[in-house]
Image (cartoon, rainbow, N blue to C red):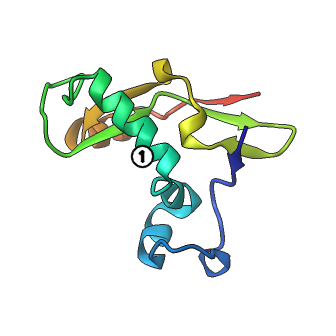
Amino acid sequence: MEVYRRFINTEDQSSNVGKENIKKHGSYGALLFDNRWKEKRAMILARDLNKCVICGFDEKLEVHHRQYHYLIEVKKFKVPWDYSEKLLITLCNSCHQRGHSKFKVPIIYL
């Protein structure tokens, strides 16, 4: 199982991802460019019929983690593609932003 640090010093990041994306999303944002996440994301979008599960909109879709897992032993979060499909849902950008402003995504300590 792979893990990542949620927050990093962007000056130390060595990746082919632009520094703008890393600064905006931290180390998590860099992982969203990984092919393993792209494959998992495509699977979740297809499962949810390429529509937001809340409003049914079919543009500006994002895959939302319903919870995050922090691995105490290694002091890191799981990488985004290691989550069970039941913990991932398709949301449009609007519903995703509204949800994050109303609710905090729970962190489960394992």
Residue in the picture at 69% in, 54% down: 5
Residue density around tag 1, few if under 14, some if 14–19, many if 20 or more, within 10 Å: some
Query: Where does the image place residue 64, in percent across and percent down from the top left?
Result: 40, 35
Q: How many numbered marks does the figure carry?
A: 1
In depth, the one of 26 and 98 nearer the eye is 26
Residue 107: x, y in percent?
62, 32
Instruction: Specify whether 63 is left or right of 68.
Output: left
**Residue that numbered label 1 is attached to:** 38
Image quadrant holding the C terminus, namely top right
Please, is residue 72 above or below residue 14 in the view?
A: above
The part of the image, by quadrant, that contains residue 73 is top right
Name the residue at 30% across, 43% down. Answer: 97
- In the picture, measured across the screen, residue 6 lies left or right of residue 102, that is right
- Residue 18: image quadrant is bottom left
Quadrant showing the N terminus: top right
What amino acid is labelled 1 in the image? Answer: Lys
Q: Residue at x 55, y 41 (%)?
A: 80
Check the image and report above or below for 75 versus 65.
below
At 27% across and 22% down in the image, what residue appears? 48
Is residue 34 depicted above or below 14 in this figure?
Answer: above
